[in-house]
């Protein structure tokens, strides 16, 4: 596996790969990798000839009171894991090269970024879309792979790529979970043993809502109340939001129909954990399909 | 000259040109071409093997009370002029393809866009940087050529290209003028005969300021007052702004030193005209260089 730290060398390498007619797959990460990231790398390998993983803890997507400095880092372990996973190229730019003095350009997706995590993390998605555009411009991938755990991020980036005509396939790969159902996240690191034992309640609440929908429940308010009850009675987590939204515009739904994204964010101490599930409801005669979709079934942005 | 209207075909054509190792030069325009545009085309031809001109009247850079619908259009004449000027490819996308329903992504350069024209045209530069990023992504140029007449635009786009790592050379070509000094602009079309006779006062005011600086005047306030007096006594134009700013951050200067951008915007009826000049002041023993710079001498964005 090659490691590149200089932006011009990455650009030039990407140019050469493209001139050779080979497809580039990109997996943007902030490092401290887990099996979720590695599943994205495997997906990228299936879809490209040269798999690039970027490792960049992006300051502009952290709020002033968030965990930028504390964000866990372990480059040696990450490098080893990526080599084993078959990553071809690791791109690790320096912050001061990505954001040189005077940097003042942002990329922003409106509307989609003002709800769910965007409501409690103002500026977060602007930081994400800005850095992802920068990475897209430097690495010039044909395809980029994101995880469903960050569902809103994936939907925002799809919108951005389409709107800006970035000509990049945005693929969304399923959430990878611990055996007890907790979605893998670098921030799980922050959990105390007690919080770690409680955290699977997030997934359980989502599964409960899905089973209720399968049993015929359609009222969002009832489902939300049930999930909130479960989380607050079974854990010490502080709920940020529990929402049922449509997958195109991320607007709250009153009744479940077609496809609904059930998403939640809960704080356990300094760990803010998110999780989600997409549930499809069959129309009339169709059977309900309540499986969490893989990348192929992941909904496309609004028509 | 080839004409392409479909975005996917333009992307594919650009990909093929790049794979052949040929350099693409882009001149983004809103059409209704004049000699100023054609000088940009000639510059692009010197700097690339395939010269692409985009013709797109971009709705998002017009304010709600501005002249989007009235903006002059003459595609047949534009096509003929571009063919004669040696343009290789004319890209004319449809508005509804560039901005399909649900489009919600913007690219914004902060700070630089809040002054001068940005102060009286809120959102204008956001529209410009958004559409230029879209055009860059579709046409994938190695070099893009802009006119110095729109000096703030050129400085904003340089900043954007650097910040987003777009890997595109931004070249700025000198303003082309009518024999009486009026900067060429599609909006000169709006002038009544009387306004047209008065409009060269903009250039004359700038030349006056330059000559005063060459004669040793350094006080911005004195220069601004002199230019305002000239314009208001010699014409019916309504001044929007007359400013002396540094070329990096576009912030007002009190005293002229190093390089200064003297920029102005004046309304003649519904025609809002802009013009500018960059004046260099020699340090101590250096002779003052008061020539309007061509693209080579155009200042680079802040270090």
Image (spheres, coloured by chain):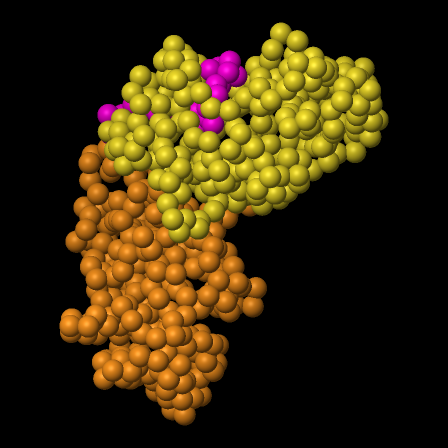
Chain colours: A orange, B yellow
Q: Position of residue A213 (x, y in %)?
A: 27, 80
> What range of the chain is rendered magenta?
B18-39
The image quadrant of residue A241 is bottom left
Side of A172 where A32 appears, left or right: right
Total residue callouts: 0
B35 up-or-down from B73: above or below:
above
Q: Residue at x 38, y 91 (%)?
A: A234
Measuring from the top left, give residue A279's x and y in whole percent: 26, 72
Query: How far from the left and from the top, in percent, is residue B75?
Result: 41, 21
The answer to whether residue A232 of the structure is visible from this angle is yes
Q: Which residue is drawn at 32% across and 30% down?
A: B5
**Residue depicted at x 75% and y 34%:** B253
Farthest residue toward the top? B179
Of residues A109 and B199, the one drawn nearer to the viewer in this rendering = B199
In magenta segment, residue A43:
no
> With B114 as the anchor, is B215 left or right in this view?
right
Can you say whether B93 is above or below A268 in the image? above
| Residue B40 shows up from this direction | no
Q: Where is residue B106 in the image (x, y as percent from the top left)?
A: 47, 47
B35 within the magenta span: yes
């Amino acid at each position: 596996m090659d490691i590149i730290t200089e932006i011009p060398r990455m650009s030039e390498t990407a140019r050469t790969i493209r001139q050779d007619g080979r497809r580039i797959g990109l997996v943007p990460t902030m490092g401290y990798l887990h099996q979720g990231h590695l599943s994205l790398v495997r997906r990228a390998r299936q879809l490209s000839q040269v798999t690039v993983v970027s490792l960049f803890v992006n300051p502009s997507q952290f709020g002033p009171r968030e965990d930028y400095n504390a964000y866990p880092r372990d480059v040696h372990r990450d490098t080893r894991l990526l080599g084993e996973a078959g990553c071809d190229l690791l791109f690790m730019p320096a912050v001061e090269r990505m954001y040189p003095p005077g940097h003042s350009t942002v990329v922003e997706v409106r509307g989609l970024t003002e709800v769910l995590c965007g409501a409690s993390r103002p500026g977060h998605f602007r930081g994400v879309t800005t850095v992802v555009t920068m990475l897209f411009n430097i690495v010039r991938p044909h395809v980029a792979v994101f995880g469903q755990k960050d569902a809103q991020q994936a939907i925002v980036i799809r919108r951005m790529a389409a709107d800006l005509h970035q000509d990049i396939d945005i693929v969304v790969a399923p959430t990878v979970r611990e055996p007890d159902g907790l979605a893998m996240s670098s921030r799980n690191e922050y959990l105390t043993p007690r919080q770690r034992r409680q955290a699977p309640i997030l997934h359980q609440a989502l599964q409960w809502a899905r089973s209720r929908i399968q049993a015929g429940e359609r009222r969002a308010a009832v489902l939300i109340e049930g999930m909130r009850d479960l989380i607050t009675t079974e854990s010490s987590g502080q709920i940020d939001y529990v929402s049922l939204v449509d997958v195109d515009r991320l607007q709250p739904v009153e009744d479940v129909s077609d496809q609904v994204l059930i998403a939640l964010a809960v704080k356990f101490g300094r760990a803010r954990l998110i999780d989600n599930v997409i549930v499809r409801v069959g129309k009339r005669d169709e059977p309900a399909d309540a499986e969490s979709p893989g990348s192929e079934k992941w909904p496309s942005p609004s028509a």
